[in-house]
Amino acid sequence: MKKNIIGRLTQSLLFASSVGLTVCQLDAAELKLLGTNMPSLDFHGFVSQGFMVTSEYNYLADNTKSGSFEFFEAGLNVSMNPLPRTHITAQGFMYDVGDSGNYQPFLDYASIEYTFSDYIGVRGGRIRKPSGIYNHIQDVDLARTYVLLPQGIYDARWRDFTTSVDGGEFFGNIPLSKAGDLSYEVYAGFLNIATDSGVANFINNRLMGGYVTSFDPATEVGSQIWWNTPINGLRFGAAFGYAFNFNYDFREPTGAPPPFASSISLRAKSSLPVQQYSAEYLWKNWTFQAEYYNVQVSQDTTSPFGTTHSFVPQEAWYGGAAYRFNKWLEAGGYYTEFYTGAPATVSSDSSQKDAALSFRFDPTDWWIIKVEGHVIRGTALLQDNASNPIRNDDAWFMLAVKTTFSF
């Protein structure tokens, strides 16, 4: 089995290498619109292939105990500046992480923005949600050291839910003289969630035999502010979001024998207030980061038998550091904790602690390889109870490898 895993990993790396050599010959392709005086279109893209293996549980993918290649990302983006102070950009994206994504392409973002001045600009379309250090650049593998970001905050299975909204935002920068400056974004829009998304898979797992049949378009409003301090490289951020009308219909098994109904229809109405606080310090070859995340899920569930109310708090935090040794080697690590449910009920299934150590290699400007080890305790983020029927609080291990090519 180990020989087979190593062989598949080698084949994957060789295939990705050939793809990378081909696309990188394009050298950030530009396409001039023939017959017009319009500015050129800038094309960029990337493709990533990963491998994960765990010692104890199936995590993120269905069969990581045996080794899984269900860890793939690819995107193609285009941008142009048709007029002064005007920028248009769009990206198509596909991914596969276990049962989420399944290589289905979707529009990751597509927006047009106009900057009136340094103080204020406006952006509309399918826009990236500003939240924390990494939310708007989760797919930019070149921008981080790690294979996996802290999953309690940046869950790789929820990409089609957490990164974008259909709406608009105001943004800008406010100078504070000797106190540095403030950058801000304020947005509002709609969340369109599919019944085969990572969010739906998460809900289905909690239903234990039930399944989501439809989602309403939810509305979300939010903001983020960054204080860029007078100390070079030091900044602090705060993000707030509120998703309301997060409603969905689902069916749940009754366990009743015929001729009684085998399942019943229910409707859930939820609200999700979110807050996230961030700190980052870039000093020489060091990067220091820390974040705290909190969401309070309030839900009313209506069935033929009445309405029940539930309240589930979730919180996560991490602290990490990375060091760039030279142009081809970087190393970093973080420690993170995630909790769900009331503090008095903390157990293996309601908490997860993760210590990660990562090494990043940059053979070229367009090719990176990452190797990362995790020591994990707790099972709150497994999100697949059927594949993990027996769970406890013992420590378990995970190895993640990823290669990315970009142009």
Image (tube, helix red, strand yellow):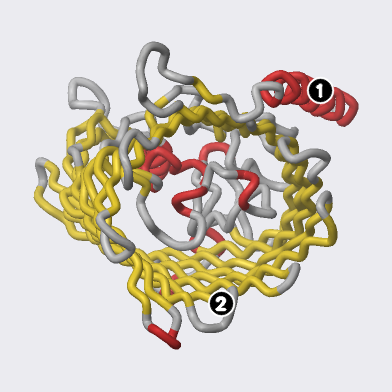
Q: Residue at x 74, y 53 (%)?
A: 397
Q: Outermost residue, top direction? A: 35
Q: Decide which of 265, 200 is in the foreground and name it.
A: 200
Callout 2 crowding tier (Cα within 10 Å): few <14, some 14–19, many ≥20? some
Q: Decide which of 275, 143 is in the foreground and name it.
A: 143
Q: Which mark is residue 346?
A: none
| Res. 274 visible in picture | no
In this picture, residue 356 sits left or right of residue 122: right
Up/down of 301 relative to 235, above or below: above
Q: Nearer the viewer, mark 1 or mark 2?
A: 2
Residue at disc 1, secondary structure: helix
Look at mark 2 in the image and give the residue it sits on: 234
Rendering coords of residue 329 (x, y %):
83, 53
In this picture, residue 18 sits left or right of residue 295: right
Residue 201 picture quarter: top left
Rendering coords of residue 74 (x, y %):
56, 29
Type of amino acid under label 1: Leu
| Res. 317 visible in picture | yes
Rendering coords of residue 197 (x, y %):
39, 34
Residue 406 picture quarter: top right
Type of amino acid under label 2: Leu
Tell me the quadrant of the picture where the C terminus can be found. Answer: top right
Residue at disc 2, secondary structure: strand
Look at mark 1 in the image and give the residue it sits on: 14
